[in-house]
Amino acid sequence: MVFNEEIFKRKSELGGSIELICGSMFSGKTEELIRRLNRARIAKLKIEIFSPKADTRFVEDALVSHNANSIPSTPVDNASAILLLSSDVHVVGIDEAQFFDDELPDVCNVLANKGIRVIVAGLDMDFKGRPFGPMPAIMAIAESVTKLHAVCVRCGNPALYSYRLVPDEAKILLGEQESYEPRCRICYHS
């Protein structure tokens, strides 16, 4: 553990980082976030994971991927709560970032400037194909951006859109395969 503490001290002096994992629904964003956080755990780094309290699709105190992989998480009401709950950690994971308030990019910067590795996952576009929530701002300040693609259910090409199947114009509509399907650009617009 002494070795990891020395690395943490050096990273704190040098600054942390912000990593963004984005893409459409069913592209594996949460799966990739869980993978990265588990690797940090293997390295014996202290991690904290947060998700928006409003996302009630799965269990309240864990991130769950569509492949049924899970990792414990803390649901929070707003982005500023992450700062209060992430003291003395090496890595912070944030899932479903699109549902957080506009403070999230500032929170990510504060954490990274403290030497913390921040890994954020979320939808980059809403069902209308427009930038979603604080995601564009996080994309702009991130050291690295990983854009994942699902498979278009219509033609099999890479899908970057989350097509809404139900007639509801609300910007936020929690749902899964009964409400959304991944589509490529051509199938989304046709």
Image: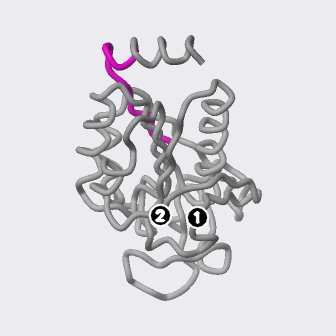
Query: Residue at 59% across / 73% down in the picture?
Result: 180
**The residue under label 2 is which amino acid type?**
Pro
Quarter of the picture holding the C terminus? bottom right
* Callout 1 amino acid: Asp
Q: How far across and down, in percent of the image, does residue 71 sit? A: 65, 52
Q: Residues within 10 Å of mark 2 (few under 14, many from 20)?
A: many
**Residue range highlighted in magenta:** 11-22
The stretch drawn in magenta includes residue 15: yes
> Residue 92 or 161: which is nearer the viewer?
92
Q: Which mark is residue 25?
A: none
Residue 162 position, x and y percent, is 54, 64
Residue under circle 1?
61
Residue 32 horizontal side relative to residue 84, left or right: right
Residue pictured at 54% horizontal, 52% vertical: 160
Number of numbered discs overlaid on the protein picture: 2
Is residue 159 at least partly visible in the picture? yes
Location of the N terminus by quadrant is top right
Regarding residue 22, the answer to whether it shows in the image is: no
In percent of width and height, residue 132 lies at: 36, 59
Residue on which disc 2 sits: 75
Q: Quick check: is 25 in the magenta stretch?
A: no
Q: Quadrant of residue 128?
A: bottom left
- Residue at x-position 56% and y-position 13%: 2
